Amino acid sequence: MERSIFGLREVKLASEGADMTFSGYGAVFGNIDSYGDVIEPGAFGATLAEAKASGDWPAMLLQHGGLTAEDNTPIGIWTDLAEDGIGLKVTGKLADTPRGREIYTLLKMEPRPAIKGMSIGYRAAAYEQRTKPEDPRRRLTKLDLFEVSIVTFPANRKANITDVKSGLTERDAERALRDAGFSRSEAKAVIASGFKALPQRDAGEAGTKAALERLLTTLKS
């Protein structure tokens, strides 16, 4: 199995969604990687079609796995894999496990993410070998994709994780309720049971209540 590593340029945080999800590019087209190879548009077409038809998707690993069973245990799942005009666009969800939560924290760190790369593990099923010294070593036209990893040390900085969705926490909701005039105990009661936990006179102005109800819906979705 061959590997091609792509670097992370930026992480954009989003407030919607409670799952530990992220998206980016596992590979980009037309860029010479550290091994002298270029991936051509369409190279993933057959392997992605086969994965979606069979349900046997490429694994999500950390650092391409390793020697132990724990190292080779997936850290999450890919929920979407598709080619676009840039490359292999991937969307994934990290597992709610110690490793998954640790990676999610590293991806969200400010002012920059602590982990900076994505890498693919594949077999070159078809390629064109270079005929001139100045050409890329190989132009990869068909790949069998086995896994896409989050990695620390990128060799090719053209691909990136473009979005990390950050779930709204109960602390965020409590802070918003306190800012709206609720006491700490009232805020905790609303988070636990909704506004029905408060007397009607304590529910506040209708617009504020509606906005906070939307916030609670987001928190619990």
Image (cartoon, rainbow, N blue to C red):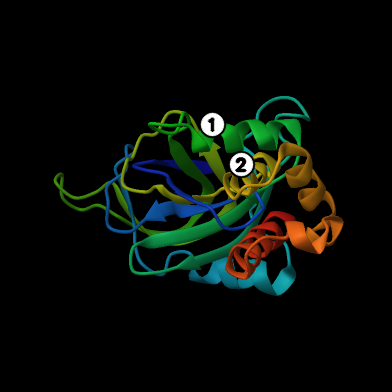
Disc 1 from disc 2: Cα separation: 24 Å
Amino acid found under the numbered disc labelled 2: Arg
Amino acid found under the numbered disc labelled 1: Leu
Rendered image: mark on residue 49:
none
Q: Where is residue 47 in the image (x, y as percent from the top left)?
A: 57, 65
Disc 1 secondary structure class: helix
Q: Residue at (68%, 37%) from the top-left corner?
A: 100
Sequence-first disc among 1 and 2: 1
User: Does residue 90 show up?
Assistant: yes
Q: Where is residue 112 in the image (x, y as percent from the top left)?
A: 39, 32
* Residue 204 relative to residue 124: left or right: right
Check the picture and name the quadrant holding the C terminus: bottom right
The residue identified by callout 2 is 175
Q: Position of residue 52 (x, y in %)?
A: 66, 71
Q: Residue at (51%, 37%) from the top-left corner?
A: 107
Q: Where is residue 192 in the image (x, y as percent from the top left)?
A: 83, 49
Q: How many labels does the image show?
A: 2
Relative to residue 186, is residue 103 depicted above or below? Answer: above
Of 164 and 118, which appears nearest the observer?
Answer: 164
Q: Which residue lies furthest to the front in this view?
A: 201
* Residue 118 relative to residue 217: left or right: left
Q: Residue at (37%, 49%) from the top-left corner?
A: 159
Q: Residue at (69%, 54%) from the top-left corner?
A: 219
User: Does residue 63 show up?
Assistant: no
Around disc 2, counting alpha carbons within 10 Å, would you say few (fewer than 14), some (14 to 19), or many (20 or more)? some
Around disc 1, counting alpha carbons within 10 Å, would you say few (fewer than 14), some (14 to 19), or many (20 or more)? some
The residue identified by callout 1 is 106
* Residue 150 relative to residue 93: left or right: left
